[in-house]
Image (spheres, rainbow, N blue to C red):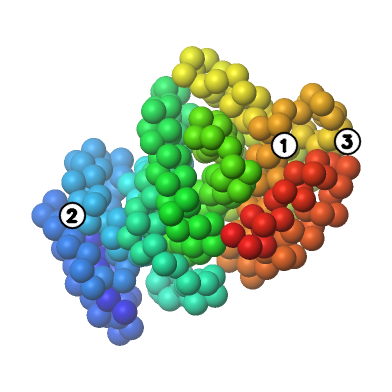
Amino acid sequence: MNVHLVGDDIAKLAVLRGMLEERFSLTSEMLDDARMSGRGVDAVVVAADLRNVSNITALKEVSDQLSRIPKRIFLTDHKSRLSTVQAYALGATSVMSSTPNRNQLLGKLLDLRSSSLGPSITQDGGRQAAFAGAACIASMFGSVLSGSEIDVDETRRAGRRIADCIAENGLADWLATVRRHHEGTYQHCLLVTGVTVDFGLSLGVPNSDLERLYMAAMFHDIGKAKIPLTILDKPGSLNVQERTLIETHPAAGYDALKANAAITAETLDAVRHHHEYLDGSGYPDGLYGDSISDLTRILTISDIFAALIEHRSYRPVMPREKAYEILESMEGKLEKPLIGAFRPVALVR
């Protein structure tokens, strides 16, 4: 396995070399002179202070080369949420502490997800669309955290790119690509967008309606920017207090977006209500039946399915058949005809 090290400090690179040289074929370079061709490189480890504007600029200059490397591990200050968000915006597929121990770093580099998540046929095309999507989502999270305005046009372009990728290569390939190269909330948002798009394609909706779907999907979990990473990335079940905090994210997302005139009322509605159920048992507003829009009903099914099949380090990926059985068991909460229409998306496409 060929691993490339990039850093802003010679001492950092020396420490990383000491950790990894017995297991991998290593190359390294300083960030301020990085060329990062990406050819023949299986993984890159970036050790740089992302509070430094010049480091961010240097990484942006090699973003095209960086995106061609399958595994992109950034080492950042985990106490800074903005540094973590910035790492994902720059193309990270994994983010770790700036001082990882050897076993943690080896675990990331030797992650065998690719052998368990199925084949990917898109190669650079799928990775590039996922890279752009994850960077866009990270940028949105950063905007929420900093109080700046979200670039809605960037989100539209990223969503359109995902839709084109799925239309050309299919949902199964998108799922495998995203689960192989992304993690956590970013993986989930990319999966939800892909599943929602494919649901729309399977229903034969026109391009204008497909855009409505992927815009709602891209924005749906933006409120999670307000949730601590220790809860979002917790390996295992949440306790009552943590679950209560997680359930604030739809309203938080709505509040973060409502002043942006470029975001439609139906997108705002979907962001706020994608955890509502037809029987009134959802949150945050306990809506019933007809008060839940068709767009939101489609998004809710896609969101649940994506959550069930996503990759988590502490459990195996759930088979799509099992995930669809769980959706079928939610009759009364989800619209039965829509669950039936979702069947080919879940099991075939």
Identify whether 237 is placed above or below 105: above
Q: Nearer the viewer, residue 273 or 5?
A: 273
> Of the residues tagged 2 and 1, which is closer to the observer?
1
Residue bearing mark 1: 297
Q: Nearer the viewer, residue 257 or 168?
A: 168
Question: Which label number is shown at residue 279?
Answer: 3
Residue at x 23% of width, y 45% of height: 60
Q: What SS does tag 2 mark?
A: helix
Residue 107 percent coordinates (x, y)? 46, 73
Task: Please report the residue visible at 72 percent of the width from the left and 37 percent of the height from the top.
Answer: 297
Tell me the distance, in whole angstroms, between the alpha carbons under discs 3 and 2: 55 Å
Amino acid type at mark 2? Leu
Lower sequence index among marks 2 and 1: 2
Q: CA distance from mark 1 to mark 3?
A: 13 Å
Identified by mark 1, the residue type is Arg
Task: Name the one closer to the observer, 139 or 264.
Answer: 264
Q: What is the x, y in percent for residue 222?
A: 55, 35
Query: Does residue 28 sit above or below 110 in this rendering?
Result: above
Residue 207 seen in this snapshot: yes
Query: Residue 66 lies in what quarter of the image?
Result: bottom left
**Residue 171, image x, y percentages:** 54, 57
Q: Is residue 93 left or right of residue 45?
A: right
The image quarter in which residue 274 lies: top right
Secondary structure at badge 3 equals loop
Residue at the left extreme of this rendering: 33
